Image (cartoon, helix red, strand yellow):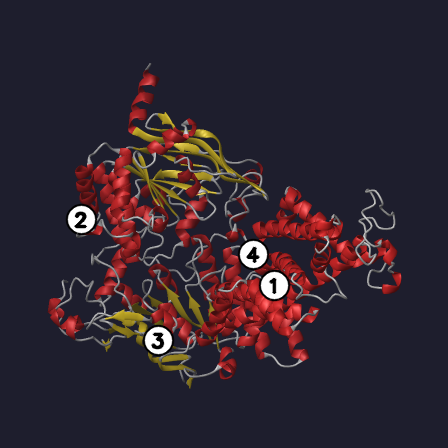
Amino acid sequence: MSATFLSSEFFHNYKRNASAIAGSIILIIFAVIVVAGPLFVAQDPYDVGQLNLLDSYKPPVWLEGGDPRFLLGTDGQGRGVLAGILYGTRVSVMIGVTAMLMSCIIGTTAGLLAGFYGGRLDAAIMRIADIQLSFPSMLIALFLMSAFGTGIDKVLIALTAVGWVVYARTVRGSTLSEVQKEYVQAARVAGLRDAKIIRRHVLPNVMTPLIVVATVQVGTFILIEASLSFLGVGVPITQPSLGLLIKNGFDVLFSGLWWTSVFPGLFIMALVFGINLFGDFLRDELNPRLK
Amino acid sequence: MAEAKTADATASETLLRVEDLRTWFHTFSGTVKAVDGVSFSVKRGEIMGLVGESGGGKSVVGFSILGLIDPPGKIESGVIEFNGENLKDAGDARLRDIRGRDIAMVFQDPMTSLNPLHTVGEQMDEMLRLHTDMDASQRHARCVEVLEDVGISRAADRLKAYPHQFSGGMRQRVVIAIAMLAQPKLVIADEPTTALDVTIQAQILKLMRRQIRDNGASMILVTHDLAVVSEMADHITVLYCGKVVERGPTDDVIRRPSHPYTRGLIDSIPNPAHRTARLKQIPGAVPDIRKLPKGCNFQDRCPRVGAVCRESEPPLVATGARAHACHFPLKEGETQ
Amino acid sequence: MTAMLQVENLHQEFRIGGSLLDRMKFTDGRLRFPDTRVKAVNGVSLTVNRGEVVALVGESGCGKSTVAKTIARIYRPSRGAIRIEGEDISSYGVREMLPVRSKMQMIFQDPFASLNPRQKVRDIVAEPLLEQTQGRAARKDVAQKTLDLLARVGLNTEHAGRYPHQFSGGQRQRIGIARALSVNPGLIIADEPVSALDVSIQAQILNLMMDLRDEFGLAYLFISHDLSVVHHIADRIGVMYLGFLVETGPREKLFSAPRHPYTRALLSAAPSIEKTRPREEIELTGEVPSALDLPSGCCFRTRCPLAFERCKVERPTLKDMGDGQQVACHLTDEPERDIS
């Protein structure tokens, strides 16, 4: 955060963009939750010893029968909804970010190789990508999860399988145009081997558009994971994500016990909303072509 | 009384008068005074060359005349008097009416002025529909005539072709044909041959000169290429950092430049007739237009610079047909 | 003494149309996969001696840049020999090329695209030299050498830590020249090194290149479309058209007594501030044909005002005129057909 950053056009535009500021405030709040969430609640929702069935289905504090220990009420096992959310957000964000990084690494590598070498390798990689894009990503993820079974590792694999394509396509496109540029030819004349040209010259110049893709994708992944968990093929019951909390509450939603699923739902909405607001700003700033 | 009379006479002879034009761009990193107090005039039937290197502001002058300056750019002040009318204060509707009919443009890249989705014929016909009251058959006849005029054979057939079906040189011919369609009084050509090869350039320049003469039109030729200007223009105006540094009749200026910058530009061009081991070069580079020095903009590159050049900006001084903005102008035949 | 560079019968073809699927076409009710090839260079031979400046001129699409980039082995030639100090490098791979790279370097046309925007100037300039350098101690010397090189091309130590976007076009071209010089090459291939620059900067760069030639005994293969630039810098000139070399000769000969109709047309078409120059008007009509479908016989006959029957059926080859000039034109056999 040097003075040059604070006086840059990027920061100047940021200061004037209300939705970018709103988005980043939301993201900062969620970052605090992910890092320090458990400090805000006394109860560890996964420690069965701390649960008391007598506390089950308590409404939020401001309603009649609310308990000051449970700000947003409790679920059927006497687990605080807020505690569940704070722990679940961690799981959701962790899955979204890790799957994004995995997709990014695999997709970028595939895109670089396709764009740099062209020919059959390019054709093969891009046809796989095309086929994959002709199915809804949710369907592919669902199929993979039903085949593998539940578990965080399996969710990560399914999301990566869905998510690499967008990087591969973006990177291939920019690689094709970068490879034409004279600085890549200059690197050849300097005597560099292909691997070094790709690593030192092409890769750094195709990364910028990925920042936008990656940001927005974390949001998408969080939603897909939530949907998978909601359908019962996502994370295991022992490590509930926000999606699983919604599902758990959903069973009793129409019995008037709305808080168990509505609050996790609001959180996931706020999280993805914040990511998208900030992502839109990044897109406008970093990649004017996509405007 | 006598004074008023002379003024009248010049007015009718002068097609375009640009006076103290300032077009500034307000960007994040500072105000770019792309055009800062430019004055010149174009007589009827005359070709005026607007010369300068990149950053000189020559293209912005052309766009300002046409009223095509978009934010963050703004025409801050000045007079653009075309055919007795001040275009600077004319409304958008009036400017649209003038563009294409009275003032036509030819750009460097013909693809920017041709719509790839319509045939050449459709685009030419539209121009005539907008600006004349010819009927369909008259319009068609005129299109064929103009297309043949610019050297495109089988014109009636070629009207049905799309821009991408023409080569670069042919496309520029089409653009010139469209520009000449409504018989404009003024053509603004912005680097019209820069993207073309020399042999094609020669063809296009010849064509443009003939078209301008035959139609009795005037032209502003915006270019960085002194050689092109010297072959085409009657008068030239040399710009540096948004200001006029010298202007006058072409041959006169090229033979006997007054401003050290003009002299430097001419000397920088390798001349096959007088080959020297080293070229005379202008040292340094064009200053950052957001941080222009106090005094003369050319001071840091000028071999004749004196103390006064760093203090005060030289005004544009006119003597006869010539004008220059320099504290220490070159005398006739003087080299630096 | 062997020549610095000797190119013999260089051919370069590029396949276009992409993959099998892209090329698929139905013609006459049958499925075909036409294999379209651009014949960019068709049998070019040239020699550059030590310390000599040889220029290739021609209009866009004439193959001059392809010749340059094929010699620099950015492309692999389709046919022909490229000898650097007698060693044929035409089929070398990346590893075999590495030692050759210290004898031959390149300067590029576009001062903006030819420098990696994410690299600092010192890393850009040092890159070719680092590839040639083994060992930690030697690498340390590279840093000092880089600064010396920057100073030599007119930049200072402070500039070394900056990124390319902080420089003007002329300064960027200086950086590109420093990069090429870093390995002490004997030959520099300069592909339109000044055509993207303003006139005043162009003169600076041309002067710098000529100074460096005198200082380091460099040879240049100089590619340009600008005849006045070529006249200023070159000892010998080759004129290219549609991938063919149509005329070569020493500078003064070629400018004062051009023989090929295309050379004559080029010279008469070039605009000049010099009004006194007598002009032979060979005016060309039409445009350059496609390199996908070369004309039969002489490549220039479709635009040549002097073309006759023989030009259609027989392709003229370069003939030595005995005075240093070589011309590929049937008019040399039948001078009575010429206008002058």
Picture quadrant where residue C256 is located: bottom left
Above or below, C36 against A222 in this view is below
According to the picture, the residue beneath numbered tag 1 turns out to be: C120
Q: Amino acid at mark 3?
A: Gln
Circles 4 and 2 on the same chain = no
First-in-chain label (1 vs 4): 1
Circles 2 and 3 on the same chain = no
What's the mark number on residue A14?
A: none
Tell me the distance, in whole angstroms, between the alpha carbons under discs 4 and 2.
Answer: 49 Å
Q: Chain of mark 4?
A: C
Q: Is residue B99 visible?
A: yes
According to the picture, the residue beneath numbered tag 4 turns out to be: C165
Q: Chain of mark 1?
A: C
Tell me the distance, in whole angstroms, between the alpha carbons under discs 1 and 2.
Answer: 57 Å
- Residue closer to the observer: C263 or B70: B70
SS for callout 1: loop
According to the picture, the residue beneath numbered tag 3 turns out to be: C12
Above or below, B253 against B315 in this view is below
According to the picture, the residue beneath numbered tag 2 turns out to be: B156
Picture quadrant where residue B40 is located: top left
First-in-chain label (4 vs 3): 3
Picture quadrant where residue C318 is located: bottom left
Is there CB contact under 8 Å for labels 2 and 3?
no
Is there CB contact under 8 Å for labels 1 and 2?
no
